[in-house]
Amino acid sequence: MPGIGAMLFSPLGIGLSAGLALEVSRFLLLVEALAGGGSGLFTLFAGGASGLYIGHGNNVPYALAGMGIVATGNGDDRGHSAVVLSGEFGGAFLRSRERPGQIWLGARVFVPLFDTLASGASRYGGVPSIPILSINMRCWL
């Protein structure tokens, strides 16, 4: 099911996302890209995740875990990218087997594994300038 979404992330910024999700019974596969900005910075994310709906019904919680790449910068050569693990927990609303479409509202955490500075050098550990928390709302068709 294709979908689009909006998000708020830290540091303060807003973004748009687009993705594809595959739902098989209660199991989920998600591929997503997002772009956003705020406070003079831009953020790009591309990644995938898998997870499941926790329960049955039209309004149920879901959990996702995945991996991706985050790039941040301000348009000059001081940006960097990071490989991140991501985890998301939220609720899926208005689900139905009889009609297409549903809405997800969740919170995602990014945990950086390592990042690459614009100079090409790698730095391991936390990367404070990438978004570490986002609030997502996605509308799936």
Image (spheres, rainbow, N blue to C red):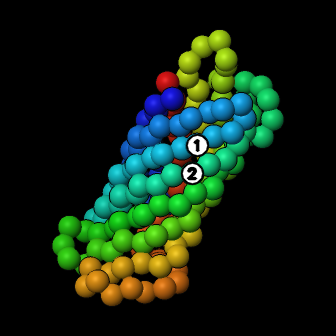
Give the SS element for disc 1.
strand
Count the labels in the image: 2
Query: Can you say whether 104 is above or below 120 in the image?
Result: above
- Residue at 65% across / 12% down in the picture? 98
Q: Residue furthest left?
A: 76
- Which of the 4 image quarters holds residue 103? top right
Q: Which mark is residue 29?
A: 1
Name which of mark 1 and mark 2 comes first in the sequence. 1
Q: Amino acid at mark 1?
A: Leu
- Which residue occupies 35% across, 61% down? 43
The answer to whether 109 is drawn above or below residue 98 in the figure is below
Q: Is residue 25 left or right of residue 136?
A: right
Residue tagged 2: 49
Instruction: From the top left corner, tell me how far across and down residue 56 is, in percent.
Output: 79, 29
The answer to whether the residue labelled 1 contacts the one labelled 2, judged by CB atoms less than 8 Å apart, is yes
**What residue is drawn where x is 58% and y is 57%?**
66
Relative to residue 111, is residue 130 drawn left or right? left
The answer to whether residue 121 of the structure is visible from this angle is yes
Quadrant of the image occupied by residue 12: bottom left
Picture coordinates of residue 36 (x, y %)?
35, 53
Q: Kindly identify the residue that appears in the image at 29 percent across and 69 percent down.
A: 73
x and y percentages locating residue 64 in the rendered image: 64, 50
